[in-house]
Structure formats: structure tokens, C-alpha cells
Amino acid sequence: MSGRIPDQFIDELLARTDITDVVASRITLRKTGQNFSALCPFHNEKSPSFSLNPNKQFYYCFGCGAGGNAISFVMEHDHLDFVDAIEVLAKDAGLEVPRDQGAPDRYEQNAELLKRLSESATFFQEQLVKHPTKEKARDYLAKERGLTGQIAKVYGIGYAPPGWDNLLKSIGNHRAEHEEQLLHGGMLIEKKEQAGHYYDRFRDRIMFPIRDNRGRVIAFGGRAFGDEKPKYLNSPETPVFHKNQELYGLYEAKQNTQVLDHIIVVEGYMDVIVLAQYGITNAVATLGTSVNSQHFRKLFKLVDKVTLCFDGDKAGRSAAIRGLEATLPVIQDGKQVRFLFLPEGEDPDSLVRKEGSDGFLTLLEDSSSLAHVLFEHARSLVTLADEEGEAQFTQNAMALIQSIPAESTLRSLLVKQLSEQSGLSSDTLTANAPIPRHQEYSPQTSDAHPPTSSGQYDPYGYDDGYAPMDYPEGDYTPYPDEAPIPHHSPKGATGSKPFKGGGQSKQGKWQGKGKWQNNSDREQFAPMSQQPRLGRIAHATLCILMHPAIAHEIEVPDPLLTGDTPERQAFSRVWRYFAKHPNNNAGHFLYQERNQDLLNTVYALLNHPDATTKQQLTNAKQEVLDMVAEQSDALGLNSSIQRLKSRGNDAINNPEAQQELRALMEQLRKKKSKF
């Protein structure tokens, strides 16, 4: 059943769910006073920094900044989207998830087709055990490719035996509707000379089921045993399978990687499986296509680091350039893309067998940065080693840099680095930049804020079609394949292990291939370790986030709830929410808030070192009251102006009164500019 999940059900589910039970079923908790502590499951650490408050039904990690309620924990820990997390918690609570009436999604429309594909996967796996010619397949997997039975089971590897209608007879079962579903699912081919008669698409091949994010089988890849053509045969496009949107092994990576903060993109099924057998479970593969922007969007929702792994030959470098051009339009601050070029004649499968997992990971640490590959590619297009060649290099580099979203910090850093190399100012480079070459990756296709009804961008979402500030009943709740709630990973600079981009000598020069001989390339990707000092308003906002119940006890004058700075907007939105929902916690707020800019501000506060202090405050209410009083005094000049105005037009027309009014308004303007 499709449709949005009613808000009332989500509230009821959270009320019935004890976050302590949810977390304790997944990690080991230790009682510490009124709270629980644990090693954080979202980043590697040796001493516990994960804290769970059972009274507030909220968790927070002081090491990486992860925090939220039971729903967000299941999403993060189990690598699920919002709807799947709701379904998991509802099942544990013995509840059925209701849905408001809505159009069925593409999976519900094709439920029977998906059932036939699942049955097909089971059939192929059974043939690997039961078919008379099974030894041919088992010997190939075990002796030629060195796979264990355990890894074959994890990835659901099967065997399509020789013959024209093995699957058709088993799954089709002479039922017209089953045959039609298998045909639409790409498992059968219709005979040209006999309409309505079919034969198996996959015959005499090793079979690799392709799963979606929920683990449902949506397609297959079949590998020939010898040199038959094609060596790999994939399912065609179907109602549930679009190869340019899917990645082989992504579901398995989410299920088998404890801390999934980095994904390696390789070229083949066997590369993914063999790496997993050697303990490197975070690899995925494209499905016969180049990696594209849609792939990066999907991966960036899950992880902060993506490494593209290619052969070191010409074809591999060409694939790397296509990957570079695909990621530039969708790269985001806080995301990192690296490039690993393997030695000539090697692929991940052969290399990890030869060098072992440690050897492969060592190469991975020596991968090249996006900046290096970008500038190296721009340089490779230049034929002249003179001023004209330098000018062409600069134009080539700027054409690529212009593809990056304008608001990205990476774009500014790359322009600055190009300025240092070319000797031209950043303003000159920007003013003379060519039009980006790859217009198909327009920012319009990114997850940018939509314009308002007036055509103007509204940075705080008051006119962007999202729910209003007070979150009335019937508020928008999305579901898959429609418009999901932005899922943000609240990880700060220390949210995961730092990516080792190659060794560094004492002189500061990069060691290993693909590195610039200075520190600039490394430093521009380094996390921001220095946090800015918080102002009084930000401190007050953080107090409310850590102690939500105090908002209901604090009166805030209307003038303090307006303003055009992120700090004022955040305070206003946070106070209004918790004043209305005093029993909710920060997890509820993060779930309900739709505004990307506001979420970034709130996550920055929760990640700030001062958050630890604020959580331990016993007088958080007084700190907020002090801020309110201070701001009220500063803005209290309004009362003097109103006093003058109340004296009537005669008094206002008095030159002395006019001078006093102008002085007060100027003083008020200066006061407001400080806050």
C-alpha cells in the first residue's frame, strides 16, 4: 500500500518505542548514572563518547555529532531510508504501518513481477546445488575464481544451466500471467517466428542477482564460463530496473559493513565479490555503464567518501575522466571523491589476491584527489609548452571548475589553487571563465532549494512549499520514489576516520603517485578542526536543543523572533517548535525540519565543542533568559520611539523631537547590526 505515513502514527510509534531497547539490540550499552554510554557505532573510537538519555528518548555522540531519536538511529545504524526504518520499528512494536490514500509506486504496481524475479533468484541458487551439471559451475567458482561457498551465499550467486526453457518451465509453470511477468522482468525473450512463445534469456551462465536498496531482486547479470560473447549479459531495462540508477553490491555493502562511511566503485561483479571475501565489504560496481551523477547522488546520501577504482591503462583513465565530469555538478561540501589507478594489467580481483587486503588498502591510501585529477586532465589537453599553453590549461581547468555548484567551498578552493598556479587573480579567472561543457549536469537537476512563488530564492523556506513553522496536523511525510525527507548525516569534522590520501614526508611533500609536491592539495581537503566561537544567541539555541523542555517556560518577545541572520532564524525556529512541543526532543525537531540551511546551522551547533558543556548545564533556562533580557534591552529602544510617536503629529513635527527620533532610530539600527 502506498501513500504518506500519517504524522499521528509516527508520534504513536515513538511513544510506544523505547530507544534504549532499540539501541541495546544493536550495540552494547553501559549504565552511567541516569544515562547509558557506549562505543559509537557511527565512527571508530577507543573510549565511549556515545550517550543515550532514556528520559528524553534521545542519543548523542560527543565524538562525531550523531544524534536523534529511535527512527534516526535505525536509519543510520541499519542503513535504511525513513520509510524502511518506520516499518522496522513498527514490526518490533507489533503495529501495522497505515498509509494515506495515494498512487502506488512502481514497486507496488509490479509486486507480482518482483515476486517472479525473487523466485528466479531462488531457482538459480538451487541449480548450483541440484542440477546434474552443477560441478561445472561449482568448479568455476571455487577453482577458477577462488570463491568460497559462504561468499557465494552472501551475494546469492546461482547457476543458469544449459537449455532453452529451464526457468520458463519452473517459474512460468504454463501460466500466461507468470510468463508475461517473466517477460516484463527481462527473464524471457519472445520468439520472433512464434508470437506468445518464449525462451530463457540466461542460459549456461553464472548468475548474479542485482538487488535494490531494500534487498529486493530487480535484475540479473550472467557471466559466461569461457570466451563466449557477450562475456557478461545483463537484464534489459524493465519497470523496476534502470541500470544507470543502480549499483551492484550496494545492498550487501550496507548489510555487511559495520561503519559504512566510504564506498569504493569498481568495474565488475567479481571485483566486488572477491574484495568482500578478503574483508573489503564496501565495494560496489556499475552495471555496464559509466559512473554517472545519479550514482554519486545516491552514494553521497550514504557516505562522505567515494573512491573510483580503475585500471591504470588508457581505458581506465578515460573512465576516470567520465567519473570526474559526473561528480563535479553534484559534489557537496563535506564529501570527498578520490581516484585509485591500479598497476598496469591489474584489476581489484587480481590485485587483492596477489597483495592481500593490506596491500590493497595501502594502495587505496595512496589514491589521488579530485583536485589532482582535475588539474592533470586539464594539463593533458594542452599541446604547447609556452604562455599560450598555460592559457589553454587555465581555460580547461576553469571549464571543469565551473561545473561545480557555485555555493561549494570546493569550487572556491580550486579557483584559489588555480590562481596560485596561473598567477591570475581569482576574480580574473572567474570573470573570464568559459561556459561549462557538460550542461546536461545542470544545477537544476541537483537537490537545490526551489524558487519561491515570486521567483526569488527564500533561504529559510518560508515560501518553498514545505510545511510551515508550526507543523500542523497533516504535515507532509514523504515516501520512497516520491520526495523523501532529506536525510542528513550529522557528522562533524571528527565524524569518521580521516581518509589517508598518501604519506607525507617531514618536508611536507607528498609521497606516492598522483600527488602535488606541496601541501596545498592535501590541506584543502582537510576537515575544519577549528570551531568558531558561539555568540549569545547561538548559545541560547544550543541550550534549548539540549534541554528542550525549558522553551515552554520562557517567554520571548516578538522582536527577538525576527531577523535575517542564520543564528536568529535558528533560535526562532527552535524556540517556537519546542514551546509548542515541550515533550519532544532534538530528534523530533531534526526529523520534522525541512529547511536545509536551518538543518546545517543546527547540526553545526550540535557538533560544536560547547554542546558537551550545554548538556551538563543545570541552569540552562537561566542562560536563555539572560540572553532574552540582554537582547530585549538592546532592542528596547523601540519603546522610546513609540513614546515619541504617541505624542502625536504636533510633537513629531517639533524639530527637537524629530532630532531625538532620528538619533534613537540610528542607535537602534547600530544595536541591531550587532546581533
Image (cartoon, grey):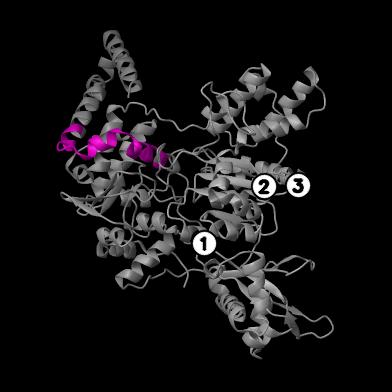
- Find disc 1 in the rendering and name its residue: 252
Q: Work out whether mark 2 precedes mark 1 in sequence or the reverse, and give the earlier one.
A: 1
- Find disc 3 in the rendering and name its residue: 315
Q: Work out whether mark 2 precedes mark 3 in sequence or the reverse, and give the earlier one.
A: 2
Mark 1 surroundings: few (<14), some (14-19) or many (≥20) residues within 10 A = many
User: How far across and how far down the image is residue 570, in percent?
Assistant: 34, 37
Q: Nearer the viewer, residue 348 or 372?
A: 348
Residue 601 magenta-highlighted: yes
Q: Is residue 300 above or below residue 238?
A: above
Residue 310, numbered circle: 2
Left/right of residue 286 with respect to residue 194 in the rendered view: left
Mark 3 surroundings: few (<14), some (14-19) or many (≥20) residues within 10 A = few
C-alpha distance separating marks 3 and 1: 28 Å
Q: Work out whether mark 3 precedes mark 1 in sequence or the reverse, and give the earlier one.
A: 1
Total label count? 3
Residue 435 in view, yes or no: no
Residue 395 in view, yes or no: yes
Q: Is residue 675 above or below residue 317?
A: above
Q: Nearer the viewer, residue 639 or 381?
A: 381
C-alpha distance separating marks 2 and 3: 9 Å
* Snapshot quadrant of residue 575: top left
Q: Is residue 665 above or below residue 148?
A: above
- The rendered magenta stretch, by its main secondary structure, is classed as helix
Magenta span of residues? 599-623
Quadrant in which the C terminus is drawn: top left
